[in-house]
Image: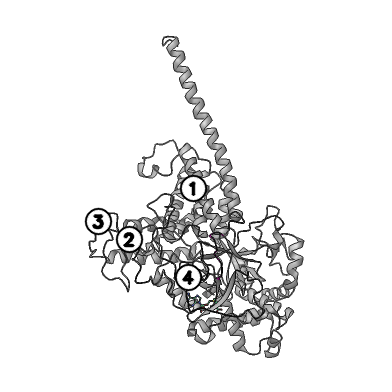
Amino acid sequence: MSFGNIRAARDSRQRKSYVLPSSDSKEYTGISQASRDGVRAPDQNSGTNDEQTQTGSGSSSQHALSAPPDTNARPIPRDGLYRELPPSLSLKSTKHAGRGIWSDENIKAGTEIIALRPRIHVLSTQHLESFCSYCCTPRPSSGLKRCTKCHALWYCGPACQKVDWNVHKYECTAISHWKESAPKSNDLSIAIPSEAVRSLGRVLWTRKAEGSNSVWWKEIDAMQSHRGSLPPSATDSHVQLAHFLVRYLGVRGPGELSSFGLHSAAELVDLISKFTTNTFTLTTPSVSPIGVTISPLVALINHSCDPNASIVFPRSSPPNENAIKEPVLRVVALRDIPPGTEILTTYIDITLSTAKRREALLETYNFTCNCSACSPPPDVPKTTDWREVFWCPRKCGGTCTLPNTAVDIVKCTKCNKIVADVEPILDAVRVGEEALEKASSLQLSDPEHVLRLTKNIIPILTSMGLTASTHPLLALFRLRQSLLISSLPSDPTKELLDEAIRVAAKSVAGLSNILREGHPIRAIALAELGKLLAVDEPPSPSTTAIRQPELEAFPPTGEARLSLAKETLQRALGELHIAFGVKGEGGEVGKEVRNMLVDIERELGVWKTKVRGAVEDAILESRAKAVSGGKS
Ligand SMILES: C[S@@+](CC[C@H](N)C(=O)[O-])C[C@H]1O[C@@H](n2cnc3c(N)ncnc32)[C@H](O)[C@@H]1O
């Protein structure tokens, strides 16, 4: 089996949306510094992961319990808005989080709760040439067709270009003007406005076309803004984005701004604050970020670090659904949701430590998270938070929580012994965080450097006892995995392929301790590991080199490797069904995994036939020897 498709998926993951804060797993997008500048894409962190089980444990034993239903939620009227909200859901409001979406019925894990095509989505600049700007189909081998006027957007064909022209006609002129005034550069992120600017442009042109009384505009208008309570740094960045937007729209004065329904600069900044709080990431079927999207209905969903639902774009195509209806956003239940429960997704990278998650949520979304993962209820027995532990230095198999504001005495969960000197471990975490930051910023421009950096830092963090799930080791594993896959040649050596498999196994193991079964990131990590295991095994090098038995133990070879690939892909398929919806059979990745399983069955059949044939030959040969009295 070839890994071309794995690499293609990874390639898009690598080039991250620059509206994203820091990881693969983001669903909502806060505006990062780069999009504040409106000019240049920054590099992003990657998510990651570690050990103990080779292919992940299959169960996430240490999860925080979900929050009990908030009985103080009060129903709120729809006022003719949110027509795509299914009847099994309702809108309610709580004091602490404002409006939210609640289930009225039992919802089974893997059920598609909401499915819609968002009115606004734009590709990040670095993905403009790789996906159709309308249906987001990846560039086919025959290539995409470029808009002949602005030369910035690409389409898979005339049908997509025609339907997108409704709004692109305004955007086309604006991009052309922007390009004329931008410094001459081959760097698209300089020549073309950021995705934040382009999304806001689309919002305002759509508003102009539909009018301020349209349902869609009222929904946009009702989105939550934090303009009044943002820290000065965030306000500054909003003002800066407003400045770029005005330039992009070609607005020359307040009169022209009012043609977009905005009557003051404050209203413009308010719109930007709504955008920051309510947009989320457009992803490929394998959850690689490729852009941003806005749906006022889906934006009503509040956040939890232990979510019961997720937002995905699986491109599952049930009959009658064709590509031009894509990208379809689906909100899928990650576990059974009883009636009267709030639907909660995650806005940030939930593999981060509690303190870092809180920091990210406060900075972009202006709230302190008190979900069950951040503040476990006092009556619930404390469980290990794998993001923040290290193995007991006495090697008893227990773990110790890294010291933080809530934990000052560090004790092993198993042998109960106190760890006196944690400073070296904290130093290692700090060094790891710095390395992660550097690696994330260089992953596009200098992947070789990042491969060297991760190769050096991972063993240091591992030797200090960090687990595969501990931040930042998990992130470093995932980043390394991503780069290893992207750099694998079409006929990889055994050494390269096996290393990619080992790192992928660490990623799966690390994620499995943190994310629940069926979380899209975990399901995709399993599928990637299974795919790597299924790649045709390269011949072993003729070994004059020193053997390293500990490295050779995993991955296995031959039939055992194929069987492990099969087992891993079967697990992946089960999780993909939850992550991307049972109805769509796990989306595009689910389909790919099913096809791979058929191929593996066939290959295993061949192995068995060969082995049986060899055994039978051996038996016949020994019988023949016995008959001839050992004379050959
Ligand atoms: C995308 S909006 C969600 C809908 C929003 N509650 C509303 O009324 O429109 C994000 C904002 O909702 C609030 N929010 C979301 N999740 C929250 C939570 N777990 N706790 C407190 N506030 C939350 C925050 O103000 C956040 O900036």
- Percent across and percent down for residue 282 are 59, 66
Name which of mark 3 and mark 4 comes first in the sequence. 4
What's the amino acid at mark 4?
Answer: Ser
Residue annotated with mark 1: 568
What's the amino acid at mark 2?
Answer: Phe
Residue annotated with mark 3: 394
Q: Quadrant of residue 48?
A: bottom left
Q: Secondary structure at mark 2?
A: strand
- The C terminus appears in which quarter of the rendering? top left
What's the amino acid at mark 1?
Answer: Thr
The foreground one among 169 and 57 is: 57
Residue annotated with mark 2: 390
Q: CA distance from mark 4 to mark 2?
A: 25 Å
Label 1 close to label 2 by CB (< 8 Å)? no
What's the amino acid at mark 3?
Answer: Arg
Name which of mark 4 and mark 2 comes first in the sequence. 4
Instruction: Inspect this view and state whether residue 625 appears.
Output: yes
Q: CA distance from mark 3 to mark 2?
A: 11 Å
Name which of mark 1 and mark 2 comes first in the sequence. 2
- Main SS of the magenta part reads loop
Q: Secondary structure at mark 3?
A: loop
Label 1 C-beta lies within 8 Å of the nearest ligand 1 atom: no
Q: CA distance from mark 3 to mark 4?
A: 35 Å
Between tags 4 and 2, which lies in front? 4
